[in-house]
Image (cartoon, rainbow, N blue to C red):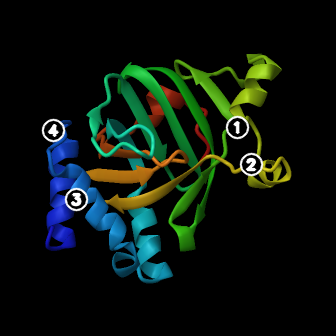
């Protein structure tokens, strides 16, 4: 890829149609390798962060870090970022959400990284946090904060953002796998969180 615009255009094209192309990984790799030029200062990283606000559908993913081929995601999975919270979950479609998680995010500007804190669990759009057994809460890291992970000698769950546009979002997860989301026109929060959304 010759420049950022052509690489982002390729990502947008694939995220919108939900199908990977043979050169999609090369486009993402071009953006990732040129991140220091694309995001040279805190201001450019803050602009990236502001593009993340909204509701997103997961469409393509590589799996773990060693894989370089994007595959279609066979179920409806979403992510949501607003001024206070990060949420994600699964459902039948954007109107029928089965399970979702919600909690305050922490954006580490220098690293382009969002630390994920999970405070609440929802079934349908109803909060069920208080009814979930403690062993499940502990396994999911419910109410844990980065300092808790640090004290336990581990890292908190996080995404490192590679790119975002009006149509697409590209991020690397903790295992090194890369995921691509497409922006949803509809706000997912009412279907996922009912009237319980903070912020």
Residue pointed to by mark 1: 119
Looking at the image, is mark 1 or mark 3 earlier in the sequence?
3
Tag count: 4
198 sits to left or right of 137: left
Q: Look at 73% across and 21% down and name the residue there.
A: 136
For label 4, the SS is helix
Foreground: disc 3 or disc 4: 3
Which residue lies most toward the right here? 151
Please tell me which residue lies in front, 69 or 130.
69
Q: Which residue is mark 3?
A: 27
Q: Residues within 10 Å of mark 2 (few under 14, many from 20)?
A: few
Residue 112 as seen in the image, left or right of residue 40: right
SS at badge 1: loop
Residue 98 percent across, percent down from the top left: 48, 18
Q: Any mark on residue 154, and which?
A: 2
Image: 126 above or below 34? above
Q: Sequence-wise, which precedes: disc 2 or disc 3?
A: 3
Q: Residue at x 14, y 44 (%)?
A: 21
Q: Quadrant of residue 94?
A: top left
Q: Secondary structure at mark 3?
A: helix
Above or below, comparing residue 1 to residue 75 in the picture: below
Residue bearing the label numbered 4: 17
Name the residue rendered at 33%, 59% in the picture. 164
Q: Horizontal and vertical percent for residue 9?
A: 15, 59
CA–CA distance in space, label 1 to label 3: 35 Å
Q: Earlier in the sequence, mark 1 or mark 2?
A: 1
Q: Secondary structure at mark 2?
A: loop
Left or right side of 138 for 195: left
């Amino acid at each position: 890829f010759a420049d950022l615009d052509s690489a982002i255009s390729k990502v947008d094209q694939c995220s919108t149609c939900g199908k990977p192309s043979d050169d999609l990984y090369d486009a993402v790799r071009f953006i990732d390798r040129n991140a220091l030029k694309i995001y040279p200062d805190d201001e450019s990283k803050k602009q990236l962060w502001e593009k993340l606000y909204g509701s997103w559908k997961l469409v393509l993913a590589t799996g773990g870090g060693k894989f370089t081929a994007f595959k279609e995601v066979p179920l409806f999975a979403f992510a949501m970022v607003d001024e206070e919270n990060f949420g994600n979950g699964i459902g039948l479609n954007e109107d029928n959400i089965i399970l979702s998680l919600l909690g305050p995010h922490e954006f580490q500007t220098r690293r382009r990284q969002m630390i994920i804190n999970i405070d609440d669990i929802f079934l349908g759009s109803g909060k069920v946090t208080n009814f979930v057994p403690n062993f499940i809460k502990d396994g999911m890291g419910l109410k844990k904060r980065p300092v808790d992970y640090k004290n336990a000698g581990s890292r908190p769950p996080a995404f490192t953002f590679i790119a975002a546009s009006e149509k697409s979002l590209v991020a690397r997860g903790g295992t090194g796998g890369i995921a691509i989301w497409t922006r949803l026109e509809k706000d997912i929060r009412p279907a996922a969180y009912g009237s319980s959304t903070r912020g």
